[in-house]
Image (spheres, helix red, strand yellow):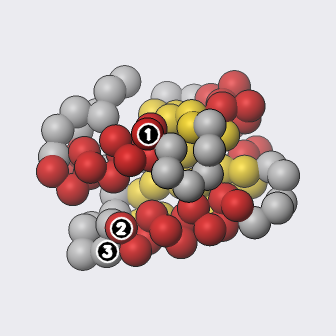
Amino acid sequence: MNAKDVRKVIVACDAGMGSSVMLAATLRKQLKGLPVEVEHTPVDAIPADADVVLTHAGLAARARAAAPGKLVIPFQIFLGDPAVTRLVDTLKKGGDLGA
């Protein structure tokens, strides 16, 4: 998938501790000015119009099952994870996101 084709990024969670809500808010700020919407949803309720799903590595299999065919990017830490940084950089600069 190319960065120019991404219109919606979902931060999917399960724990309900607020960390993923903070990540979604941070992404909105980092992607401000780009035609990319960022939403926070439960991992089992990923919307069909999602282009990219960010989720904790422990939830990646559930996210793939809930959103077949979508690019799922797992991460280990909620703030400052290299996978999230790569996504933001690629969305800003353009290029291939993978799968």
Quarter the C terminus occupies: top left
Along the viewing direction, whichever of 78 and 54 lies nearer the viewer: 78
Q: Is residue 61 left or right of 5 when viewed as pictured?
A: right
Q: CA distance from mark 1 to mark 3?
A: 20 Å
> Under tag 1, what secondary structure?
helix
Q: Please, is residue 98 above or below residue 36 in the view? A: above
Residue at label 1?
82
Residue at label 2?
30
Q: Is residue 55 left or right of 28 when viewed as pictured?
A: right
Counting from the top left corner in percent of width and height, residue 23 is at 57, 61
Q: Please, is residue 8 above or below residue 54 in the view? A: below
Q: Please say if the residues under marks 2 and 3 sit with CB atoms less than 8 Å apart.
A: yes
| Residue at x-position 43% and y-position 71% | 28
Along the viewing direction, whichever of 21 and 12 lies nearer the viewer: 21
Q: Please say if the residues under marks 1 and 2 sit with CB atoms less than 8 Å apart.
A: no
Q: CA distance from mark 2 to mark 3?
A: 6 Å
Task: Say how many tags the image has.
Answer: 3
| Residue at x-position 34% and y-position 41% | 86
Counting from the top left corner in percent of width and height, residue 95 is at 17, 38
Residue at label 3?
32
Q: Earlier in the sequence, mark 1 or mark 3?
A: 3
